Amino acid sequence: MFAKAILSLAALAVAVNAVPAPSAVCSQGRRASSEACCVWFDVLDDIQENLFDGSECGEEAHESLRLTFHDAIGFSPLLFREGKFGGGGADGSIMAFSEIETNFHANDGVDEIVEEQRPFALKHQVSFGDFIQFAGAVAVSNCAGGPRLQFLAGRSNISRPSPDLLVPEPSDDNDKIFARMGDAGFSPVEVVDLLASHSVAAQDKVDPTIPGTPFDSTPSSFDVQFFVETLLKGTLFPGNGSNVGEVESPLGGEFRLFSDSNIARDARTACEWQSFITDHASMVRKFEAVMVKLATLGQNPRALTDCSEVIPVPANVQLPPATLPAGKSLKDVQVACRATPFPAIRAAPGPATTVAPVPPS
Ligand SMILES: *[C@@H]1O[C@H](CO)[C@@H](O)[C@H](O)[C@H]1NC(C)=O
Ligand SMILES: *[C@@H]1O[C@H](CO)[C@@H](O)[C@H](O)[C@H]1NC(C)=O
């Protein structure tokens, strides 16, 4: 009996260490680690209903995840070293100075989501920098198989416009992209990890005649198909021809960016790219890790409050294993990783795949 009591005490100690005791009770009896997190439950309810159309992984979710990058990557230690202002990173400047930043060529099209998000940030009186990262984290939690991102709150609402030319373009070559991303603190392999976001993404402005054309056949699932389909030989342009930043895609209704195509085939990144095809868990884990960095670029994380408990736990869905789209075979794969053989994945049965656009909502 004595031994049993000691055992249960030990178990209790472990439990207390693992879960910090929630100290604040928020709306609808929800609990948070800090009072400062409570407002985010209210933001959550509002955006799930009124921005993401009932917790969907649709166009607004895709664009909200994209905006986390376009705000945060405006940060250049290189410019600071040259004595210039290098941007504030994940500081909300893309929303505060949207009339400047959304006119940068690389930010073409993000004005729409900035204007859709702004009223929510103003209504709940949270900083633009916090709001953009929060909305992106909630957005991707709505996607089947999605990650649960960390969310830290407390970014200042005061910012300055980012300098131009810090956001990589789909028409940039790999050396240029890796140099820019390296300046911001990301290795080429971490660029691949960030590009898991293109699993739930579509283009609007590279070919403006076919807005909503996704980068893989499953744009509502944070699955591995993007990493398979980008390695297939390109055969067609889904829209009205070749545009700057576009290369041929393998499927009708699917879009391939020049940059995705090149990074998938680059010796520096091809094995990381291929590794995700058979390892969704690794894709999720690495995306979560790299987003911790992205969301705090230019910020001091120790000065922020961890409100991650507000981010929804993504639904536990069993995603199907990677497949070759119907009509394709392993002969259509342009294998680029030399260290590891390409996995023996199967083709889906049925007639050749075409992909439907993401409907605007
Ligand atoms: C953040 O700054 C904008 C101006 O850029 C302002 O309209 C908004 O009210 C500010 N929000 C907070 C919470 O201070
Ligand atoms: C595609 O459409 C754009 C915009 O309408 C136009 O500028 C371009 O010339 C077209 N390209 C082709 C190959 O038809």
Image (cartoon, rainbow, N blue to C red):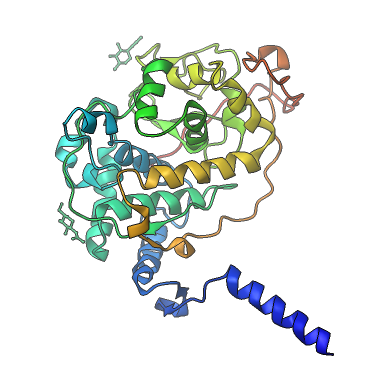
For the residue pair 130 and 154, the one nearer the viewer reads as 154
Q: Residue at x 59, y 24 (%)?
A: 229
Relative to residue 185, is residue 171 depicted above or below?
A: above
37 to the left or right of 83: right
Q: The N terminus lies in which quarter of the figure?
A: bottom right
Q: How many marks?
A: 0
Name the spot of residue 78 as percent of width and height, x first: 27, 29
Q: Horizontally, is 18 left or right of 74 in the view?
A: right
Q: Is residue 152 left or right of residue 189?
A: left
Residue at left 69%, top 48%? 318
Give the quarter of the image for residue 180.
top left
Q: Is residue 170 visible?
A: no
Q: Quadrant of residue 209?
A: top left
Q: Residue furthest right?
A: 1
Is residue 302 visible in the rendered structure shown here?
A: yes
- Which image quarter holds the C terminus? top left
Asked which quadrant contains residue 41, the reply is bottom left
Across and down, in percent, residue 218 comes to: 57, 36
Q: Is residue 196 left or right of residue 185?
A: right
Ligand 2 resides in the quarter of the picture at top left
Q: Nearer the viewer, residue 314 or 6?
A: 6
How far across and how far down the image is residue 33, in percent?
A: 45, 72
Instruction: Identify the residue at horizontal 47%, vertical 35% (top origin).
Output: 194
Residue 164, compared with residue 64, is above or below; it is above
Report the residue at 65% width, 29% height from top: 275
- Residue 18 % position (x, y): 60, 68
Q: Give the vertical position of 222 relative to 22 (above or below).
A: above
